[in-house]
Amino acid sequence: MGVKTSMAYRYCYNCGGKLERSSPNLLICKRCDFHFYINPKPANALILENEKGEILLLKRKKQPKKGYWDLPGGFVDLGENIEESVEREIKEELGIHLKEFKYLGSYLDKYFYQGMNFPTLCFVFYGKLRNVQIASSHEEFSQIAFFPPNKIPFEKIAFNCLKEAIKEYVKKV
């Protein structure tokens, strides 16, 4: 845990008392004994490959990491499992229904947002795009592009977990 993450949780959600660190991932309220665990937020990402073997990347329009390349995906919503969250994110971001994808792996990272580093656990999947029309605009992305595996701009990929996942995927194919 980075300092920003642990320092962000100062007061008890139950009574407003001061939280004190008991262990690296546990804060305890000395007033009401509420236990607050610092757990990662579940997220998803999908590596999509077209018929030419190119990988789809989206350029972020907003912070965090504005102007960097990203994979389609996002955070898991309450009441959905990881597969449902992938399907929802792909529909929201690309305007397509994709039900066939495979699991690649899970990756730890941090998501810096509004002055805090949130720990994340990103579940990355991969799939193929065949004869589908992708939505050309979205409020979160300024550009959509396909890159051959040997021309992926790794220095401009938004999050370390996605760099790791794409590198692992490229080795496998």
Image (cartoon, grey):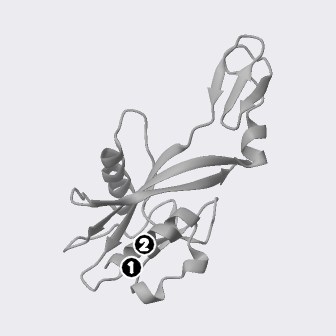
Position of 68 with respect to 72 (left or right) is: right
Q: Quadrant of residue 128?
A: bottom left
Q: Residue furthest front?
A: 23
Q: Quadrant of residue 79?
A: top left
Relative height, residue 38 to residue 120 (above, below) = above
Query: Residue 75 in the image: x percent, y percent?
Result: 47, 47
Query: Residue 8 in the image: x percent, y percent?
Result: 75, 38
Q: Quadrant of the C terminus?
A: bottom left
User: SS of the residue at dot 1?
Assistant: helix
Please rate how many residues cluster around mark 1, counting C-alpha atoms within 10 Å: few if below 14, some from 14 to 19, many from 20.
few
Query: Residue 83 in the image: x percent, y percent?
Result: 31, 48
Relative height, residue 100 to residue 113 (above, below) = below
Residue ID at (26%, 60%): 101
Three-letter residue code for mark 1: Lys
Asked if the residue under mark 2 is in contact with the one under mark 1, i.e. CB atoms within 8 Å, the reply is yes
Three-letter residue code for mark 2: Glu
Q: Quadrant of residue 49?
A: bottom left
The residue that disc 2 covers is 168
Relative height, residue 173 to residue 3 (above, below) = below
Q: CA distance from mark 1 to mark 2?
A: 5 Å
Please rate how many residues cluster around mark 2, counting C-alpha atoms within 10 Å: few if below 14, some from 14 to 19, many from 20.
few
Residue closest to the eye, 88 or 105: 105
**Tag count:** 2
User: SS of the residue at dot 2?
Assistant: helix
Is residue 162 in view from this perspective?
yes
The residue that disc 1 covers is 171
Is residue 159 in view from this perspective?
no
Query: Residue 20 in the image: x percent, y percent?
Result: 78, 26
Position of 159 with respect to 74 (left or right) is: right
